[in-house]
Every structure is written in C-alpha cells, then in structure tokens.
Image: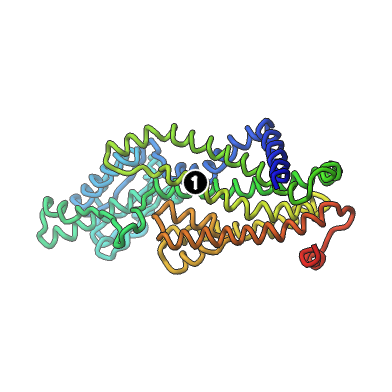
Amino acid sequence: MRTELHRIWLLAKREYLQRVRSRSFLVTTAIIPLFMFLVGVLPSKLATMRQTGTVEILVASDDPKLAEEFKRQLARRSQSSGTTYEVEIRQVPNAEPAAERQKLEAEANQRGFDGVLWLTTDAVEKQHVYYATRSATDFMLMGSLRSAMVLAAAKYRLAKRGVTDDNFENILRMELETTSLEPGGARAGGEASFLTALFLVLILYMSVLVNGMAVMRSVLEEKTSRVMEVMLAVVTPRELMAGKIIGVAAVGLTQIVIWATLAMLLGSPGIAAAKAAGTQSPLSWSMVFYFALFYLLGYLLYSAMYAAVGAAMGSEDEAQQWHLIVAMPIIVAIAIVLLIYRQPNSTLSVVLSLIPFFAPILMFLRTTLQQPPLWQMALCIGLLIATIYLMLQACAKIYRVGILMYGKRPTLPEMMKWLKEA
C-alpha cells in the first residue's frame, strides 16, 4: 500500500511540475480570468457606462410649465449619466396638424437637433407621446427621456389636482431596504454581488472543463506516443490515472490560489471603501473556500470521465466527439444559473443543486448568495463524494482496458462490456 501511494505521489509530482513550469500554465492563469471578465462583465459595463456628450432636443408643447418641468427633470439625469441635455422649447397648438409636425421635424433635422419630442397636454392625457430621433437604438437615452417625461407628466397631473411642488417631491421620495424573511436567508442583491457571483461561477466552470480536458489530452498524448507502454512496466493503470488526476488537480488549485490572492489584493481598496460606507464587500474568504471545495469535487467528478475518454479513444478527434457528452451536465448547470440566482431557496433550486453533476456549479452559486442549511450542504457533499467514488471505479475499469487498445474506436456497448468484465 505504501509503495502504491509513493508511486502515485511521484506520478502526481511529475505531472504537477511539468505543467506548472510550462508556458501554457502562465498563459491560462492570465487568460481565463481575462476571458471571463470580457465575456461576463465587460459587455454590461460598456452598455451602462457613462457617456459624455451633448444631446440637443426640441420640445414642442402647448404648456410652457409642462415643458420646463421636463427640461428640469432631464437636467437632473445629466448628473448621473454624464450627458448634457440642451432643450429648446417651441410653443405649438395642442392639436398640431401632421403637416406642421413634418415641417418642425424638417427644421430640427436641418438645425442638427438629435430629436423632437411632442409633449402636449393632449398627448399627456392620452398617455401617448411622440418622439422623432436620430438614435432610436440608444436605450440609455430613451430611458432618461422616458423617466423625465413620466415625472413631468405626473407633476402636471397632480398640479391639476392642487398638489404643490414641495408635496410633489415628498410624494415621489421612497427608499427600499431589502432583508431576508428567514434567518440566514439570501443576502440583498445588487449589481456588485451579481457580477461577483457570476464571475466566480464562470471561473469555476472554465477551471473544471479546462483541467478535465487537460487530463484527457495528457492521456491521449502518452497513449498515441506509446510512452504509456513504458510507464505501465513499472506502475499499474489505476496508479497512472490517479497520479494524473491528482497532479492536474494540484495545478488547478495553484491557479485558484493565485486568482484568489490577486482578487483580494486588487479588491482591497474596494473592500475598505465598502467597510467605510457601512456595506458588505461582495467578495469574502468564505467564497474562496467554497470555490476551492467545489472546484476540487467537480474536477474529480469530471476528470475521471475525461481520463476514461482519453484512454478509450485512439485520437484527439475521436475524443472531441465525446467531449460534449461529458461536459453536457455542467453546461446545463450554467444555463440555469439565473434561475438559481433569482430564487435560491425554491424547491426546484434546492433539488437541482443537490444533483451531483450540477452541484459544483449550482450549490456553489447558492453559497455566494446565502449560507444553505447544514443538512443541504452535508447531503450535497455526501452525494458528490459517493458519485465521485462510483465514477472513479467505473472509469478506472475503462481506463485499464482502453489504455492499451489501438486502431479501433470502441463503441458504447463495448465500453459497457469493459465495465462488467474488468
């Protein structure tokens, strides 16, 4: 037993040092977080980032007070959006003929206005306002105009019912503080917590798949180069598979430590600012712990299957055809991440997060939102460990038979026969 463990340790050490010293390790350590940032964070940041500039709008209205209130509300939006709004008010009759509207729009187009808003009292009463613009797809601008228009229209309607300006501001002032109904329930959401949870889930997803495929490629390289035959003269197939899985797992954990350290160092100013403001930082050491735990469990589960695929197939092209089948459960888990995020305590979320093939992603996501009940965590980890044990036993049998087979692509019935006879 001691000799067997020593050989596994030597194989794992060789696999670890060979990968950590390679240039690809440095590249993937830097590229994966950058890729996840570009995919998961950058698009939303670009879509909502402040855009400086000036937007010129011509407001046609029969009520100067209504138009001035719209102008004032729009000016308030410029403080948060970074856009300066220049509004010119044009007095028009309440019921403007279509010909006059086209004439005014042609004038606005000639003078370089960005849009013409028909904010008449008749349009407000009908709750249908017409706006002609050069940039109909700018949803940030449309949102600012819609918000300013709604407030101006609300103030106009309330003024007709005798509500003064001071009372109007008090009527609209309202703050919502979110807390959990249950002890230990979900934490209050927010953009920062959502992006942090999404970023960590994507990193976990990529780490499990990338390192699992690394095991598959390593087995294929040694099998096709016939190095495997030399190694099997001194070690057993089970020891060889265990050494590869443990060595690549150590590489993945090394990357996680590097990412966690950089995240905490780079995020320390934000953490200090959050504490000074009396708010909780979205990133914590408990997230790092659960990330490492579920990475390790998820990696052991999927790497065993990838090792079996690598041993059974004769080339990387054949193995790639099985890649999607092996990765399908974790891909499905990623597809339902938003469902879990919205309702982490629902029965469906709890059941899905307990399924071993989904658990590394979904249960980890739930830990970033709340602390699940102890029995759920214990059951999840117990089911994962039991499934990992069964998968390792089954995949070791396929690995033992398939690793020395060449020239013929095995079928699924043949691999099932290996499981029975090995």
Image side of residue 227 versus residue 56, left or right: right
> Where the C terminus falls, by quadrant?
bottom right
Q: Is residue 242 above or below residue 384?
A: above
In this rendering, position of residue 30 left or right of residue 123: right
Which of these two is toward me, 383 or 97?
383
Q: Is residue 301 above or below residue 250?
A: below
Instruction: Where is residue 122? Give x, y as percent.
Output: 25, 62
Q: Which residue is mark 1?
A: 199
Residue at 57 percent across and 38 percent down: it is: 255
Q: Where does the image place residue 93, in percent across and percent down from the top left? A: 24, 56
The residue at the point 47 percent across, 44 percent down is 288
* Disc 1, SS: helix
Q: Is residue 323 left or right of residue 92?
A: right
Neighbor class of circle 1 (other Cα within 10 Å; few <14, some 14-19, many 20+) is some
Q: How many marks?
A: 1
The chosen color scheme is rainbow
| Residue located at (85% from left, 58% from top) | 409
Which percent across, then down, holds residue 214? 69, 45
